[in-house]
């Protein structure tokens, strides 16, 4: 869960996160086309550390019931869900390089957290679990997105992350 340094940072992040995600995904595509690794996106769910197995199952059950519920029943289900731990979506990029000619060697894999990459673009000196401030260089003097700066930062971060993840170990 992100903690914003100021309410202004939260407002500017709302403006920037979708463009950051778009630029990250596009630069991942461009960079992975040039390497001999297969890429795939995985949608994950992250639960708060205090969520028990029973609570997780209860959330899944209630969410399934919510899909076909009447408006009255849906409100009651939402109320029950609000009392339970809430998972957050996570998106991962899994990179796989095929097994070598040696029979006993498994394929190499590397995983990158797409949201962490987005946060690295959107926020100045991003560090997990620290209050975040929007990188002011991503906005021009009128508060509009500086697309060139955004793309350059996303491109550099994606290249660095993929190169590090796929480096021969």
Image (cartoon, helix red, strand yellow):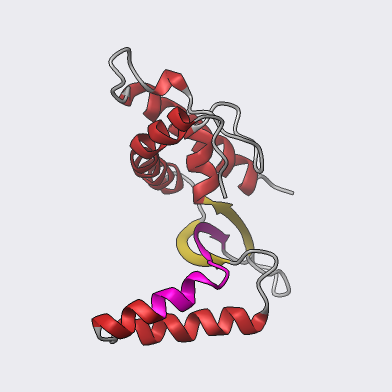
Residue 93: x and y, percent? 50, 56
At a point 44% along the width and 44% down the height, the residue shown is 34
Whether residue 106 sits left or right of residue 91 in the image: it is right
- Residue 80 is a magenta residue: yes
Location of residue 21 by image quarter: top left
Labels in figure, total: 0
Residue 141, compared with residue 118, is above or below; it is: above
Q: In front here: 40 or 141?
A: 141
Q: In front here: 20 or 67?
A: 67
Location of residue 131 by image quarter: top right
Q: In front here: 4 or 32?
A: 4
Query: Which residue range is magenta in the image?
Result: 77-97
Extreme residue toward the top, this view: 141
Residue 15: x and y, percent? 34, 35
- Residue 91 is a magenta residue: yes
At a point 66% along the width and 43% down the height, the residue shown is 129
Residue 139: x and y, percent? 36, 21
Residue 145, compared with residue 71, is above or below; it is: above
At a point 42% along the width and 42% down the height, the residue shown is 24
């Amino acid at each position: 869960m992100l903690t914003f340094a100021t309410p202004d940072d939260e407002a500017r992040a709302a403006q920037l996160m979708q463009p950051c995600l778009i630029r990250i995904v596009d630069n991942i595509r461009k960079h992975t086309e040039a390497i001999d690794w297969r890429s795939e996106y995985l949608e994950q769910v992250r639960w708060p550390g205090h969520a028990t197995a029973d609570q997780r199952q209860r959330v899944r059950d209630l969410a399934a019931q919510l899909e076909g519920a009447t408006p009255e029943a849906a409100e009651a289900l939402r109320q029950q869900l609000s009392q339970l731990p809430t998972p957050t979506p996570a998106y991962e990029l899994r990179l796989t390089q095929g097994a070598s000619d040696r029979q006993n060697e498994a394929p190499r894999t590397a995983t990158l957290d797409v949201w962490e990459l987005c946060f690295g673009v959107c926020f100045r000196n991003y560090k997990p679990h620290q209050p975040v401030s929007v990188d002011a260089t991503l906005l021009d003097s009128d508060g509009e997105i500086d697309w060139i700066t955004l793309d350059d930062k996303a491109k550099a971060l994606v290249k660095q992350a993929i190169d590090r993840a796929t480096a021969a170990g």
